[in-house]
Image: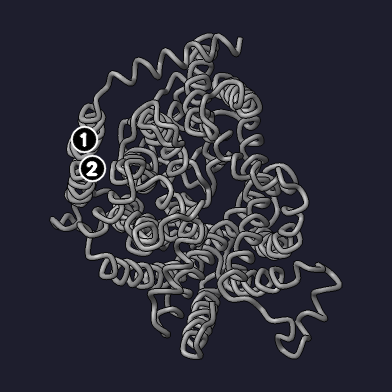
Amino acid sequence: MIALVNKIGDLLVKALLFVPSWGVKVLAGMIFLALAILPFLLPKDYIFKGAPNQKLWRDIRFWTLAVVLVELAIYLYF
Amino acid sequence: MALARIDIIIIFLYLFGVMILGSYFSRYVKTSKDYFIAGKLLPWWAIGMSLVVSDIGALDFIAVSGQGYQYGIVVANFDWIGCLPPMILGAFIFIPFYWRSGIYTIPEYLGLRYNSAVRAIQAVLWGSFLACVLGVMYWATGLMLLEFVPIPDDFLGGSVKALLYPLWGENWKIMAYIIFIALIVGVYTLAGGLSAVVMTDVVQLIIMYIGGIAIIVLGLIAVGGLEGLKEKIFALGPQYHNHFKLFLPADSPSPYPWPGIIFGLAFVLAPAYWLGNQAIIQRTLGARSEWDSKAGIIWGAFLHALIPVLITFPGLIALALYPGEATGDTALPRLIHKLLPPGLTGLVFAAFLAALMSSVDSNLNSAATVWMRDIYQRFLVKNASDRHYLLVGRLLTLIFVFWGIFFAPIVTKFSGLYIAFQSFLTVIQGPNLALILLGVLWKRTTGWGGLAGLLSGLALSITMFVFKDEIFARSDPFLYIAWWSFVGSVLVTVIVSLLTKPEPKEKLLGLVFRLAQNDAELQNALKERAEK
């Protein structure tokens, strides 16, 4: 059983070696972009639910966008 | 390391200030709700700051900078891709459901969503972990503090040794630090509950940032800026050429190849931690509104983006300045010793204490909450008065303060114990995440499915952990154990759920994403559930 698991593991590692380093960066970038877009797909009422008002600075979708862009830049640089 | 008089004054001012501030919040504690979830009055800015400082302990400064020294910037993934994605998902999808359902603990949510058996297993797992890990935290804290500032045998005329030596022998110096810290944290946590924990965290984050930034600025000046840092490390040899890469190849011998980082960390361990760890989640449950709970997490994510700079870069700076160490664990103490002037050393030391105390107080408060809410109130004394539960909550906090102190030296008696607690999270996180994800996102998940998924996931991760040397090629495969136990748990939960009877809609309202059609329907469902 353990020998079989090892064989499958080796095959997986070999397959993953074909993914170039830029491919992994693209994958990470896609994760970040998806996270930046996700809040904009949700209804505005849901975003502001419980907020005392709907002023622009309270729109946490833009907070999310800002922090995602910061980390995206870090992942592109390194 | 010798501290100057100014350093000692700064440290004592900090400790005294935090204790007074924390104790001040006792005036707002009138009910068990005030004590355990701050009466649902916490503002977003305090939640965000508390989230960050509760996540980062003093050990992170030492251990992560050590790992940075050894493996490079790849360890920063734990605080970048290992934090932001689950925090965003938590803010917009998961936490609003926890907050709305009025729960105090994650096992409580799982109990509502699945059944009492799932709640009981989760409560025992988390309750035991939070209690036992206190001892581990205390011991590591005492060790670290003693390394920074040794206590002389004749400290306070030898009275401290005379008092502690008969009880703990050669460990008396470590125990002196442990008792000192445990009592300070214990006083304000016992008095003010979650409000005190969160509000002292706010101060602790500011101190931690000032201290951390001071090391980085002085360190970067010493190595000639970021470019100078890179040049110096690359000049050490080809084995250091990956030190500025966030993703390492799949066959990298380090514990952090990219598939482990993406699949194990980003997809499993990080979401399980940020969506299911009681010590983290509890402050979001105390938010004054649903918006504050969401905004607090995003604000926390923003503040957290700076953390890798504070805890990984000291390791890289130490490597550039003092290469050739076998492990990097001495990297940060050496930087502090060599780079910081008197006064700033005290501030950085206070930053360590801040990181340390904020993790201990969160753990203490959460341990008391889980034991009170999910074990005592659920299974032992069901219908007592709120005053009774508040008293028991405080009593439990006091018990855990002393439990931590007396359990700490036991950690050293069993060498495997320390590693076991460190690995415990790895073992339970995969199945935990499976239950939370499927519970919130898929209405077809049933109580039986959840129970089967939890038990089989735990069995799988324990088996992988026991046979890890035979199964995995690398020495520390915790990222892969988390991933495969998650996959196994999801599969079993889905299969058993499909084979069992669906849960009635009224049981799921308010607990599953987008199931309630409107707010009135949701509020009615929650009210009915609360009355049962």
**Which quadrant holds the N terminus of chain B?**
bottom right
- Indicate the position of residue B512 as horizontal and vertical percent values: 41, 31
In front: B319, or B198? B319
- The residue that label 1 is drawn on is A29
**Which quadrant holds the C terminus of chain B?**
top right
The residue under the point 25% across, 42% down is: A46
Q: Is residue A17 left or right of residue B203?
A: left
Label 2 element class? helix
- The residue that label 2 is drawn on is A75
Residue B524 occupies quadrant: top left
- Indicate the position of residue B327 as horizontal and vertical percent values: 51, 52
- Label 2: chain letter: A
- Indicate the position of residue B22 as horizontal and vertical percent values: 52, 74
- Label 1: chain letter: A
Kindly report the distance in space between the C-alpha atoms of the residues bearing marks 1 and 2.
Answer: 8 Å
Q: Is residue B408 above or below residue B458?
A: below
The residue under the point 48% across, 55% down is: B325
The residue under the point 40% across, 16% down is: A12
Label 1 element class? helix
Q: Residues within 10 Å of mark 1 (few under 14, many from 20)?
A: some
- Callout 1 touching callout 2 (CB < 8 Å): yes
- Indicate the position of residue B436 as horizontal and vertical percent values: 47, 32
Question: Can residue B246 be spotted in the picture?
Answer: yes
* Picture mark count: 2
Question: Can residue B503 be spotted in the picture?
Answer: no
Residue type, mark 1 in image: Gly
